[in-house]
Amino acid sequence: MFAFLSSRQLLFVTHRNRRTQFQLGLLQKTAFFSIKSFSSLGLSESKQQKEAQRHSFTVSYLINSCGFSPKSALLASHKVHFGNPDKPDSVLNLLKDNGFNDTHITKLIKQFPRFLLLEPKNTLLPKIEFFRSIGISTSDLPRILSTSPDLLKRSLKNHLIPCYDILKSLLVENEKVIKTLRRSHWSLQYITISIVPNVELLREVGVPQSNISFLVTTCPFVACTRPSKLVKAIQEVKEMGIHPSKIVFVQAIVVVLTIKKPMWEYKFEIFKRWGWSKEDTLLAFKKDPNFMRLSVKNIMKTMNFLVNKFGRPSTDIARNPVVLHLSLEKRIIPRCSVIQILVANDLVKDGLSFSSFLLVNEKSFLEKYVSKFQDIAPHLLNLYQNKMDLLDVEIQFEKVGETKQLSNQTIKPAAEADSGKLEQQNEAQRHSFTVSYLINSCGLSPKSALLASKKVHFENPDKPDSVLNLLKRNGFNDTHITKLIKINPRFLLSDPTKTLLPKIEFFLSIGVSSSDLPRTLTLSPDLLQRSLNNVLIPSYNFLKSLLVEKEKVITTLKRSRWSLHYMTICMVPNVELLREVGVPQSSISFLVTTCPFVACTEPSKFIKAVQEVKEMGVDPSKIVFVQAIKMVLSLKKPMWEYKLEIFKRWGWSKEDTLLAFKKDPSFMGLSEKNIMKKMNFLVDKLGLPSIDIARNPVVLHLSLEKRIIPRCSVIQILIAKDLVKNDLSFSSFLLVNEKSFLKKYVSKFQDFVPQLLSLYQNKMDLLDVAIQFEKVGETKQL
């Protein structure tokens, strides 16, 4: 019925009589926007009325007897129709007799609406009896079948019984057989031609029965892999040095078969960035193959904390890759916080192995690292439970330290106190003053102040005060100051007159306005760390000769952290090369201004990228040429190949992807999730040929919720009533600006479809608009 279903158009209506009595004549699911109303279907009027009554009864029954919401009932009614309750009632009665409650029934029918038309005695009852006979308890049966309704779709004699018999011979235990049947949607054919020879193969190489059962039970789709592929995977895993008798052998097979080669290489590239050699990554894989299946975001977040924040060598993680599976917020950070406090106060040794504190269970960790030190650090538990800040705990330790020092002074004469203790006291006082100043004068939080105090120390407020006064005189407010000091605490020790003031005057002289100066420097504090004479002035002069306009020069200085050295040895030859191949000044300015890091690429790499883009057939005179260079340089080869693989799944050839790239290179930088979501909507929901998107790849940048769905909703309504043609191109309605779209497709038809604007603004549902159309139609007939 609908070629186009989404979370905002799934036919929600407010009045029940509309839901159950209205016959919607919209949107045949054939191709993009090929939609017909009921009046064009060639049905007789009486036949239409009967169809409407049956449809209305089905919706009503699903709501009242099966517990459906109106929206779910309307959707399900497109898959099942009945004119009376006899058969559905007998099906529901059978389910209730066998322990199914209302929740089970709703869940089951929602997934498989045609279940209501099955023969209760001849089809359903024998299957239920079969599942009981193989060991499924009466209490478990409803839960299992409502969770895995596919089991009830299968033929008892031709599928369920033969599959059970084969799996029973392979897995032995009934529970594992049932678990496998529930997880796998494969037919008997796959079990006989794939699982049987694959299990035999695993046995031949020495995989124990327990590990085979694990593989078949947890990953039946892998066990059903084509035998030739499994042979190759087994060989690959054996060559890595993983022993077949270990459980990691079958885990490694799963990973090798499920991760495509481009993504595999991309993951190696990611760990290489963290200092792992190929051997380190293989070592980690042999210990825990599943870590390679973690998302890039997950890996980067955890590695960043453990290496950059916690200060551990990245190779320590290669020796314990299982830590990458742990929750950063719930386990890693709380436990590392406790260990940091204990190490800082010499209560445990530095360099503890991850397994000793991250991999132990909750009870063991609390006993070994919290309860054990309860007398010395009573607030450690609150820190671990995220009820206290690191700063508060450190203050408690300082108090304990002061008490100990006083105690020692009563026992030992003053002459015995060495200079080291005096220095410690002075350091503690200086540290305490710094933290206090950062909180009270710079607006930092206690946690931020404690972190910043590790980078800067001062005993009195003279220099910091003079720095802050200079900033305030030049328009910096409290928010600007807090942000600036948080990023660069050592800024407080700068010489205000000799260092800071000349830089501020320089930025004002090149065109940064007084009102923009604070925002510019807080967003780009690196500018204040650069030498005025050795970096800022020469860089400005060079960029001014290249970009001409002051605004573009300032933008580039703000965006780039490269030194003058990089500009002279990289940017100059790269710009010269672009000019030689015919890139206009406007495109060069665009590249240098928006992507200075690309313009500062090592010339040999830059030459290679330029050559590659030229070979793709991209015209150097077009802006897409420099956009393509940026994408070629920023997208690693494994990720490039992985993206090609993604579009291949949607039916694009390599030439199609190249066509799209030549039109809009930046679409290749979109995330897989973003691409899949929009392709799924445009191709699967709208029925659009995927090649149309290759011709207009810019649509993949548009917001699905804010632009694509609302505009497609309007166009569908207009096409349904022949108000616009059904062969509209994307550019005519998705790529035009808001004003043009409203004028051309909403305001123009306001008299005929007054509700169109409400639909577009997400204030009205497709069904409500369709009802208005029906009323207009009825008026015309009268």
Image (spheres, rainbow, N blue to C red):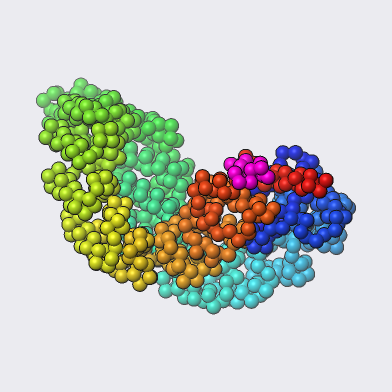
356 on left or right of 584 = right
Q: Please tell me which residue lies in front, 11 or 69.
A: 11
674, above or below 512, in the image: below
Q: How many marks?
A: 0
Q: Please tell me which residue lies in front, 1 or 470.
A: 1
352, above or below 346, in the image: below
Image coordinates of residue 625 in percent, x first then y, are 35, 63
Q: What residue is shown at x 35% (from left), y 49% (from top)?
A: 304
Tell me if I can see residue 229 in this picture.
yes
State yes or no: residue 86 in magenta.
no
* Position of the N terminus by quadrant: bottom right
Image coordinates of residue 662 in percent, x first then y, are 41, 65
Corner quadrant of residue 588: bottom left
Q: What residue is shown at x 25% (from left), y 33% (from top)?
A: 514
Q: Please tell me which residue lies in front, 713 or 534.
A: 713
Image coordinates of residue 473 in percent, x first then y, are 22, 27
Image coordinates of residue 634 in percent, x first then y, are 35, 59
Q: What residue is shown at x 54% (from left), y 55% (from top)?
A: 732
Outermost residue on the top side: it is 410
Q: What residue is shown at x 19% (from left), y 52% (from top)?
A: 545
Which stretch did the figure color magenta? Answer: 747-762
State yes or no: residue 760 in magenta.
yes
Tell me if I can see residue 213 in this picture.
no
629 on left or right of 496 = right
Q: Please tell me which residue lies in front, 245 or 330.
A: 330
142 on left or right of 358 = right
467, above or below 269, in the image: above
